[in-house]
């Protein structure tokens, strides 16, 4: 057969002609359990409850979480991210129940530390599930954010979770100066070197949070979050927000949502290669893949592998994902046991 006039150096197929060669073209993008963080919704009911807007995702409580987590920990689960659900607890202007003795996360933390001594426990820190107006900060009477009051309150809540046993506090409120406020509260209580601050540093005002807001009943009761979450088109503000949080002393960074913001993931990793970078595959991204697979439009396992790979390739060190149980199963096929 006649060789084509394609130059040898332009032949790519030879370099991917064996599975091992393909692995060599895929450096450092595999997933190990420590590259995953599993978000958990914590309420106070007796029974485990499946969430209608997020099929396959459940609400747990101190009464039933232990047996539900045991098999996942056995499969290698390293990190969880706790979200409190206020349930029947009253909501008010300052989110009193975010850190009250009745808060389900505050109650669960010491138990979780005892049950799973090797599990890393992160807590989301925000006001929206606990405020009557559903915003992530404290409001002035004209409906604008009172930033100073907000960061003082957020720092108080972060400190309460840290004292109750959280290894990581992760503020998702997007108020200005919250990282500095949290750091100084932790340092003031002797926890400055013991508790890690994971900043939701580039969090965009996204339509992909819909199912989550339904689950946590945390949708704003008026207006929206566009005055504190980042405009989806803004690369520059994402860079400034990240730089600001780094300067205020956060330990780790995050981009949220994931798939629609992979350029921001790369931009963040390129600017701060020395900071672990988390990417949050949010509720809408979960729902999108779940429903598309249910409808027979795509093969969930294959597409999920591809999406995770894209996040790792863009620069994610850790992916926060509701698919964590499925991914752990794919890492440890049943036949290995
Ligand atoms: C609340 C918060 C939200 C998410 C995490 N923390 C929603 C929001 O900001 O409106 C979204 C998570 C998801 O969609 O999976 N501060
Ligand atoms: Zn919030």
Image (spheres, rainbow, N blue to C red):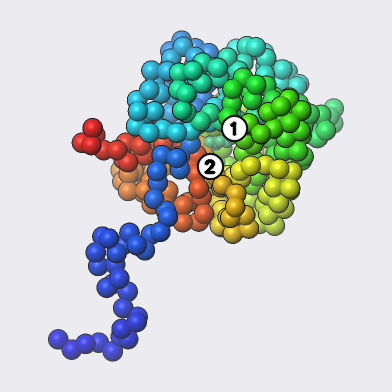
Numbered disc 2: secondary structure: strand
Instruction: From the top left corner, tell me how far across and down residue 165 is, in percent.
Output: 59, 22
Instruction: In the rendered view, tell whether residue 158 sits above or below residue 306.
Output: above
Q: Quadrant of ligand 1?
A: top right
Asked whether mark 2 lies closer than 8 Å to ligand 1, one says: yes
Label 1: which residue? Answer: 168
163 left or right of 69 in image: right
Instruction: From the top left corner, tell me how far across and down residue 52 is, in percent.
Output: 45, 26
Q: Which is more toward the observer, 329 or 262?
A: 329
Q: Residue furthest right?
A: 141
Q: Residue at x 48, y 43 (%)?
A: 319
Q: Residue at x 62, y 35 (%)?
A: 196
Residue 196 seen anywhere in this rendered image of the structure:
yes
Image quadrant assignment for residue 224: top right
Instruction: From the top left corner, tell me how far across and down residue 159 is, in percent.
Output: 69, 25
In the picture, the quarter occupied by the N terminus is: bottom left
Q: In the rendered structure, which disc, 1 or 2, sits on the residue that comes first in sequence?
A: 1
Assess disc 2: are there few (<14), some (14-19) or many (≥20) residues with their C-alpha within 10 Å of its C-alpha.
many
Q: Residue at x 62, y 19 (%)?
A: 164
């Amino acid at each position: 057969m006649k060789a084509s006039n394609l130059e040898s150096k332009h032949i790519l197929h030879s370099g991917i002609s064996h599975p091992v060669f393909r692995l060599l073209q895929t450096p450092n993008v595999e997933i190990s359990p420590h590259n995953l963080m599993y978000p958990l919704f914590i309420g106070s009911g007796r029974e485990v409850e499946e969430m209608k807007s997020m099929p396959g995702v459940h609400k747990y409580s101190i009464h039933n979480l232990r047996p539900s987590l045991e098999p996942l920990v056995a499969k290698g689960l390293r990190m969880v991210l706790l979200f409190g659900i206020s349930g029947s607890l009253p909501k008010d202007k300052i989110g009193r129940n975010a850190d009250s003795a009745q808060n389900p996360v505050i109650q669960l933390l010491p138990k979780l530390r005892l049950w799973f001594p090797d599990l890393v426990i992160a807590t989301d820190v925000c006001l929206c599930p606990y405020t009557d107006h559903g915003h992530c900060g404290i409001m002035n009477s004209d409906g604008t954010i009172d930033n100073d009051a907000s960061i003082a309150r957020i720092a108080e809540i972060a400190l309460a979770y840290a004292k109750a046993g959280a290894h990581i506090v992760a503020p998702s409120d997007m108020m200005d100066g919250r990282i500095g406020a949290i750091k100084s509260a932790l340092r003031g209580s002797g926890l400055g070197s013991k508790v890690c601050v994971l900043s939701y540093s580039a969090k965009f005002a996204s339509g992909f949070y819909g199912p989550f807001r339904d689950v946590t009943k945390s949708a704003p009761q008026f207006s929206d979050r566009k005055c504190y979450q980042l405009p989806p088109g803004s690369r520059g503000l994402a860079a400034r927000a990240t730089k600001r949080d780094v300067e205020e002393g956060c330990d780790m960074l995050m981009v949220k949502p994931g798939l629609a913001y992979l350029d921001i993931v790369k931009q963040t990793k390129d600017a701060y290669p020395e900071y672990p970078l988390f990417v949050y595959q949010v509720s809408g991204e979960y729902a999108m893949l779940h429903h598309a697979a249910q409808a027979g439009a795509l093969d969930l396992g294959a597409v999920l592998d591809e999406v995770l790979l894209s996040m790792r390739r863009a620069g994610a060190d850790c992916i926060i994902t509701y698919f964590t149980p499925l991914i752990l199963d794919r890492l440890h096929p049943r036949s290995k046991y």
